[in-house]
Structures are given as structure tokens and as C-alpha cells.
Image (cartoon, rainbow, N blue to C red):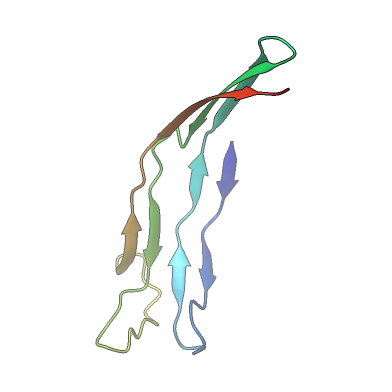
Amino acid sequence: MKYHSSFTMVPGWADYQLDTQDSEMTLDFLTSYDWNEHIGLRFEALNLTDQVDRFSGARQGADDLRGSNDPNDLATYSHFGRTLMFDVSYKD
């Protein structure tokens, strides 16, 4: 499990541009199994809580001026969903 509280950052070189990343909590799962000395199996499930990545501080105009730092001014909203991976490895 990973958690971080919200924080404010300067996404560019200008110190007046502020974005706030909302707090997030994600849950991942990983398991592996050695079938024998040559074959290994691994299963990985990422973002089981289906957390979105949300930044506030709305963009205004062509220069992407932010600065409002208001949580209701949505700057970026990214949704990557859950990721499931399964792999088989072979060792000589």
C-alpha cells in the first residue's frame, strides 16, 4: 500500500505556477513462485484501488498560468486503471 498526502509543487521554471497533487492511496499485489530450478512464475496487480491522479490549479491562457491553487480548479485528471501482469521466466 502506498499513501501520500496532498502537496503543492512548482511544475515549471516560474515560481508563480503552482499545482497541488491530491492525496492518493494505491494498493498493489505481487507474488512469485519458482516452479523448479529453471522455471519461475510471477503475477503482479497494480493500482487495485483504481486510484486517479488529480492535480488542481487550473490552467489559464496560452502560458499555462496556474497560481490559483484552488482544489476546485482542475488542472490534470489522469486515469490509468488497474494493471495485471503475468510472466514466466526461464533460467539455464
Q: Residue at x 38, y 57 (%)?
A: 54
Quadrant (top left, top right, bottom left, bottom right) of the C terminus: top right
The residue at the far left in this view is: 61
* Position in image of residue 56 (x %, y %): 37, 67
Where residue 82 appears, as percent x and y from the top left, is 39, 35
In the drawing, does residue 71 fall left or right of residue 88? left
Q: Is residue 55 above or below residue 40?
A: below
Q: Quadrant of residue 50?
A: top left
What is the quadrant of residue 37 in the picture? top right
Residue 77 in which image quadrant: bottom left
> Picture coordinates of residue 85 (x, y %)?
47, 30
Nearest the eye: 17 or 32: 32
Q: Residue at x 51, y 78 (%)?
A: 10
* Residue 16 placement, left or right of 88: left
- Of 66 and 33, nearer the camera is 33
Q: Residue at x 33, y 49 (%)?
A: 79
Outermost residue on the top side: it is: 36
Q: Residue at x 59, y 27 (%)?
A: 30
Give coordinates of residue 43: x percent, y percent: 54, 23
How many numbered callouts? Answer: 0
Check the image and name the residue furthest to the front.
92
Quarter the N terminus occupies: top right
